[in-house]
Amino acid sequence: MAAKTAAAQKVAPLADRVVVKALEETETMRGGLYIPDTAKEKPQQGEVIAVGPGRTEDGKRVAMEVKAGDKVLYGKYSGTEVSIDGEQLLILRESDILAIVNN
């Protein structure tokens, strides 16, 4: 399991929401030029750093399928971007997660 960051300790998502830290990939072209952040596409892979307790269905709590430390794929424009202690995080619903990446 991944070590909790300071931002993860301050955020407790509600219901079926998940807090994800995007995994940035450094991109270099053949000539050694770096692609600026403004020209890069939004990442679609991240690491789960906090999960909510799950959604309520028919008066019963439905457990979450993801856990902290999982690497996940999510939709390009899903979730809400927030900045906590200078760290960029994404809060999204569990249903916005497309897959868990297995190593």
Image: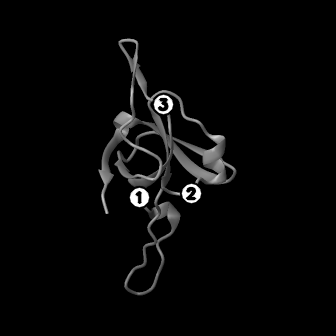
Can you name the residue that lies furthest to the right here?
Answer: 85
| Mark 2 surroundings within 10 Å by alpha-carbon count, few (fewer than 14), some (14 through 19), many (20 or more) | few
Q: Which residue is mark 1?
A: 41
Query: What amino acid type is highlighted by mark number 1?
Result: Glu
Per the image, label 2 sits on a secondary structure element best described as loop
Tags 3 and 2 touching, CB below 8 Å = no
Q: What label does residue 53 carry, if any?
A: 3
Q: CA distance from mark 3 to mark 2?
A: 19 Å
Residue 4 seen in the current view: yes
Looking at the rendered structure, the kind of residue marked 3 is Pro
Kindly indicate the quadrant of the structure image that contains residue 102: bottom left
Please state which amino acid type lies under the numbered disc 2. Ala
- Where does the image place residue 60, in percent across and percent down from the top left? 39, 17
The one of 24 and 63 positioned closer to us in this rendering: 63
Residue 44: percent from the left, percent from the top? Answer: 38, 53
Q: Is residue 83 visible?
A: no
Distance between mark 1 and mark 3 Cα atoms? 31 Å
Residue extending farthest to the top is 58
Residue name at image x 61 percent, y 40 percent: 11
Residue 59 drawn above or below residue 17: above
In contact (CB < 8 Å): disc 1 and disc 2: no
On residue 3, which mark appears? 2
- As helix, strand or loop, the secondary structure at mark 3 comes to loop
Apparent side of residue 68 relative to residue 83 in the rendered image (left or right)? left
Q: Secondary structure at mark 1?
A: loop
